[in-house]
Amino acid sequence: MRLTNNELLKAVRLALYASATAAVGLTSIPVFAQDNNEQGSERLETIVVTGSRIRRVDVESASPVFSIEKADIQKSGKLTIGDLIQESPSISGAATNPSVNNGGGSGASTVSLRGLGSQRTLLLVDGRRLAYADVNSIPINMVERIDILKDGASAIYGSDAIGGVVNFILSKNYQGLSASFDYGISDRDDGERRGFQMNLGHSSDRGSINIGATYNKQDAIGAGDRSFSNPALYNYYGTVISLGSGSVPDGRFSIRRTAAEAVGIFCPGSSTNVNVTRIHGAEGTDASQFRCYVGGGDNNDTYNYSPFNLELTPQERGGLFVNGNYRLTDTVEAYVTAFTNKTRSRYIIAPLPLIVAQLGAPISAQSVYNPFGVNISSGGIRDVFGGNREGMFETQADQFSSGLRGSFGDTWQWDAGITWARTSQDTGNTGYYYLPAFADAIGPSFYDADGIARCGTPTAPIADCTPLNLFNLDATTAAGALTRAQLDQLQLTVRSHSYSTQKSAQFNLTGEIFDLPAGAVGLAVGGEYRKDYQYFQPDFVSTIRDPNAGSCLTFTDACGSPSSGQLSVREFYGELFIPILADLPFAKSLNMTLGSRYSDYSAFGTTTNSKIGIEYRPIDDLMLRGTIAEVFRSPTISDLYGGTTPSADTYNDPCSGLVAGDPRLSNPACAGLAPGFVQVTAQTQALYGANAFVQPEKGRTFTWGAVYDPQWLPGLSTSLDFWKVRLTDTIGAIGTQVIIDQCFTFGRFCNLFSRQLGAGGNGDIAFVSNLTQNIGRIDTDGVDFSIKYRLPETRFGNFNVSLDTTYVAKYDAEVIEGDITTRYHRAGTYTSSSAGGDGNYARWRGLGAISWNMGAFDAGWRMRFVGPTRFGDYDTAGDGSQVVSPGGDPLDNSFRIGGSTFHNLTAGYNAEAINTRFEIGVDNVFDKQPPILWQYGFNGNTDERTYDTVGRYYWARVGVKF
């Protein structure tokens, strides 16, 4: 392909600019084509840019791409990819990372572009799918560049490319041997880390090979060692108090007020039941050793679980990789890429709460240890002497790709390959008990003739059972020590195993099919076959045995259902690049890109998604661009085949109380009922879980913007892109009451429940199908802005500055599409995922950097900004939608926090005489603490998925290359 002088100068100018700005933190300029001096320096090598399969000289395309170069990765001081990539301003929501303790602990980091969730962000390695969604499983020293495509790309890559695509470009043609050693520790002498990386490569005119290893170990940081996370805090209408769990070490027991007063315990209020607790240090053998439980206010009795949790989970990770190619002929080469990663990690949370309602039976009034003489079926005891609950993960992730690629003719290139991946994870959870032993042990008991406590009654004793005293678990007392010894015999470790594989074969062909006056028309076509399989198997103890209650042989939070399934897809795609105008006044170039992908899934059938992109340069310095893309997400194996669990759900029937002439008689929710119907029972049978008939999510994305690289100010580059995502049929569960109400109000979902009609039927709802459905909708839009400037060289060295920002103008999530009462305005707010929210959607996020180098010395300053955020209770707006008060009014339990900026400093020195580089750095230089969100922050009073929870952190690295 021949280039005009204008194109050549433009490409060379941009290439020089990229090399000069490589030291600027994170850069939005993708990798550049290299000069090929054939035919008088008028030919340049073509490249493939993330977001397209067509090879082109142009480095900027219609789709915005944010890139992180290898130099930036190394200078960041990060040991894992997740620590680095989650700083990107376009990532928001509730992506996980190793700071997530309760609900995490696997050591994984995921990516949530546009805040749409990790399930709607596609991860690639050299353009091929990453099977395991943990970006930390990729050895960081294997990566040459990270491209973040901030645009929908289902027409190019298929499912999941809704929020965008992250493509990890691997190092190639590496020459020599290098090794580096890393050490870090926090300002508070915890969170110690050690790391090692090694690369060995060789290149020749026939091919190259690059092999490497990586190892890092990160120690834990306890929540009790950070002031913001200890104690657990609660903000009640502007009053902040220390408030923890109602399951307390001295026990909380709910008994009738009359029973308490009968033994001399008089509690404030007039409720039927009162809560009492053992006086600390007392044996608890007599009712006089108990008092009223204080559940709120200052000096309350709640349990402060925070000190036992973690702000950074421990992890140990090792990986190996190989990446090579060998030229078989002048036009054909073989290639192979393989990597493996093994991670050991764990979470630690507070000791198990023994919730009386989950023990299988009430504490019997006839128990020899019950000082109140009444059945107790509600309350909670914290088993502090049983030790913390710990979840241990061992994860093995392997991926292998190999194939052939080559060229023919002047421009045509092809690639045919296979990919195989496997992920295996074993978990173990300590601090639990064998539950069936509790029911008999807390039931009726008696003393035999020898004064020994026995289970049962004198006429019906229970063999091999010893009564359990839950009124005293304090091992420092005589009674508590005896109970502790009994519980130790029942303690167990709950285990599970999960396994998944992915097998795929791909073929890609790209080249130029004919010339137009403005240039050559490019074509890319190809196909892929992919098959996924996964299964999950809990052990005997934790397998759910009573689906109606979701219970197993241990406590409910450790129970699970076995599941397995597979999903396959055949796909074909085509992409066309059409140059329309070139080298005309006010039309230096005008190009159009068309793409479409056809997918045929084994689970739900076919879907076709297309895309159109426009690039227009009125002058050399300015490019206007825009895209419209159809996107989709296939349901996962878990969505389709993850198993089901029945449940006895409570509900209120909107048809109850029908009378003659009642307009409700014609309502579809009341079909088959007659006047006089009144709801008889408050419960109905519901079925939750996977749904083999769920369909894909689908939607459209839009981007339009400009890139400006002025010739009058060399070294300056700016871009501004507006974006919008519209996603429908989002996958989720509805809820029993919501299904009934939706049918009554809107006439939908009526087919998901049935009534007891006909002979002997009382009209009550008999069954509700609460399986996963395509029910919701998401609408979000915003703006990305980037500016980078390479200052003219000075006698003080070279300086570069950059700023990348994202503004979220709108993020509306409808739980039920079309029902405005279920529409939540998330932009500018935070709602914990544990509370049913989608995470943090601060309107503004930014990443700025300043770098300097002179001779062998260099330094950098990186700043990450997360804007103000509102959080708290949602109120109903005038249109019926749900919103957090914009001003942050504590009287409405609505709050507002200001923005947070975290600063990182680095410095390096290249000792060329000994082939060694020395680096030091300080992360979070000013020890910026995360904002306190009280009870709205599920882990440690804050949002650990967004903010730095470690504090000031020092690190150093030395690297040697031979």
Image: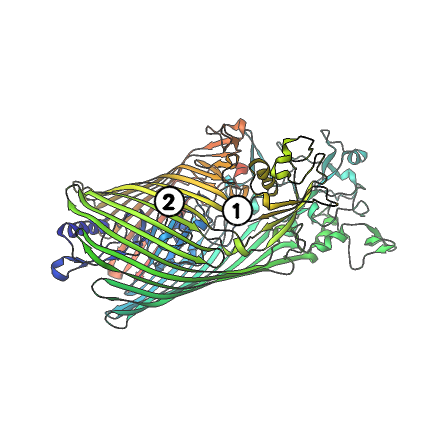
Task: Locate the C terminus by quadrant.
Answer: bottom left
**Res. 938 mark:** none
Residue 184 x/y as whole percent: 41, 52
Asked if residue 27 shows in the view, the reply is: no
Q: Which residue is mark 2?
A: 701
Out of 917 and 529, give the one closest to the viewer: 529
Out of 360 and 48, give the one closest to the viewer: 48
Question: Label 2 is placed on what type of residue?
Answer: Thr
Q: Which residue of the protein is positioned furthest toward the left in this rendering? A: 40
Out of 600 and 24, give the one closest to the viewer: 600
Question: Is 914 on the left or on the right of 469, as rendered?
Answer: left
In primary-sequence order, the first of circles 2 and 1 is 2
Measured along the vertical axis of the image, is residue 680 above or below residue 34? Answer: above
- Please tell me how crowded label 2 is: few (under 14), some (14-19), or many (20+) other residues with Cα within 10 Å: many
Residue 300 x/y as whole percent: 64, 35
Q: Which residue is mark 1?
A: 732
Task: Locate the N terminus by quadrant.
Answer: bottom left
